[in-house]
Image: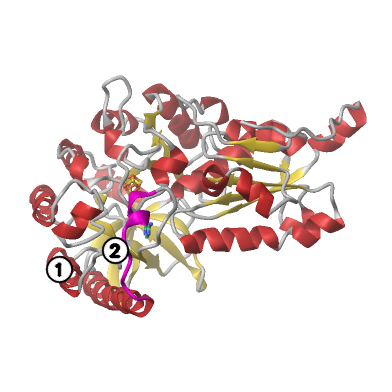
Amino acid sequence: MSTKSKTIVSTEQSQSAQKQAKFYIITYGCQMNSYDSQLMSSILEKEGYHRAQSIDQADIIIINTCSVREHAVNRAISRVESLKPLKKKNPQIRIGITGCIPQQMKNSLLEKLPFIDFILGPDNFQEIASCAKDTNGIFTDFKESLIYSKYAPPARGNFPEAFVAVMRGCNNFCSYCVVPYTRGKEKSRSIDDICHEVNILSKKGYKRVILLGQNVNNFNDTGKRLPYLLSKIVRIKGIERIGFLTSHPAYFPLETIDIMKDEPKIEKFLHLPLQSGSSKILKLMKRNYTKSSYISIIEKVRNKIDDIFLSTDIIVGFPGESEDDFSETIEIIKKISFDSAYMFIYSPRRFTLANSFNDFIGKEVKNQRLRELIRVQSEITKKKSKAYKGKILDILITGKNKKNYLESIGISVYNKIVVVKEQINKGEIVKVSINDVKGWTPIGEIFSRKGDIKRKKVRN
Ligand code: 5AD
Ligand code: SF4
């Protein structure tokens, strides 16, 4: 780690001025990055800083970045570049880049953007307090353990839903993926630490937690695994919905589905990235499963919970992907009929094994494959959404419908987002009868509120 020190501010007067300083965080990337931004906010608020309502009111600007694909890197870097005039006008403003881009680029990032004050990798958020104050430099050391309880993220903004990181890092080294290089080796938090955080969330009225990990099924606190952690969290009063992300098909224990089936609070939702439908490509990707072993997991999962919500990630245009390989992806997508999918064009990443593979597929072919995949999956998602008509679902209200403020948005225990044609408070759980479906979105009316059901039960 190298640190360039800057002017040390030490008078009492300037310290109290710093205490009122405001920070603003811009977040790119995955749910883990959103969580990390909450973590940094929590640390800064504990140090006496305040959130700025807009970027031009901020004394400290943090850009929390993702480097999983080139496009994400370019977007984040051009956003940082756009802050240069602000820094020129007011050199007192402190600007930092955090997350995966600094971890990967280190010195070269500061050389590219010399007006930046500090950069922090994903294991170095603890340093945000001193960097916000007066420390400049590069902090990108990997850490051995994860202790966040001091900084339980307030998770503001997404109420009544909150992410909770339970493990970080990845040991898999899929040949296309930069994550093991930016987030380091797998490490799990302690169950006590996680439950402490979920308890705080529940006391604040949060109703839904989504447990996060790059490889959440490898969660391991001294031999206690994800099903055990889930069994602890279901007992936390006030928390009504528990989801988890992301599972890996090669290391997916079916006991996780057993507890999902038995515990009403655990969401019947599995995100299981397939990446490709061709076993040849899966081998090149170093995914450690084949097309048929993936299908067999899905069959076993559906045997246990037949209407489970399944989502996946797919990469098209991986080096060596022939028309036949791509057709296999389309075939399996149709066969499995995922409820939703995140679809990407392969993006070569520095350090990864696939970066050395010959990439002969033309840009237009890659674009065309992505368009075709999106077309096929959209039809499936639409068809599966239509099947919601006539159902009665328990919906956790998560906010207003941005297209019509007289309506609410909520989520079912099957991870399906629905519109409810009534204004309902966030955090309420209501029974909704779905009487229409627009595009991918079921639309419903209140069937009954939780209180109504209780009252009915009392009368009976
Ligand atoms: N190019 C394209 N997509 C990628 N992903 C990860 N690395 C790459 C890459 N180099 C996708 C995978 C992963 C998701 C989070 O991002 O599908 O599951
Ligand atoms: Fe990346 Fe593979 Fe690890 Fe997922 S499992 S984070 S794709 S290396």
| Residue 203: image location, x then y, percent | 49, 33
- How many numbered dots are placed on residues in this image? 2
| Residue 59: image location, x then y, percent | 78, 47
Judge whether residue 430 can be spotted in this image: no
Which three-letter amino acid code belongs to the residue tagged 1?
Answer: Glu
The residue identified by callout 2 is: 319
Is most of the magenta stretch helix, strand or loop? loop
Foreground: disc 1 or disc 2: 2
- Magenta segment boundaries in residue numbering: 352-362
Side (left or right) of 43 relative to 369: right
Residue at 41% from the left image edge and 48% from the top image edge? 178
167 or 354: nearer the eye? Answer: 354
Q: Are marks 1 and 2 in contact (CB under 8 Å)?
A: no
Rendering quarter of residue 342: bottom left
Look at the picture and state if 188 lies above or below 155.
above
Judge whether residue 262 can be spotted in this image: yes
Residue 198 in magenta? no
Q: Which of the two labelled residues, at mark 1 and mark 2, occupies the earlier sequence position? A: 2
Rendering quarter of residue 227: top left
353 or 221: nearer the eye? Answer: 353
Side (left or right) of 453 relative to 109: left
The residue identified by callout 1 is: 328
The quadrant of the image that shows the C terminus is top left
Q: Residue furthest top?
A: 222
Count residues near mark 2 (Cα–Cα under 10 Å), then give few for <14, some for 14-19, many for 20+: many
Which three-letter amino acid code belongs to the residue tagged 2?
Answer: Pro
| Residue 282: image location, x then y, percent | 20, 55
| Residue 406: image location, x then y, percent | 51, 70
Residue 353 in magenta? yes
Look at the picture and state if 376 lies above or below 11.
below
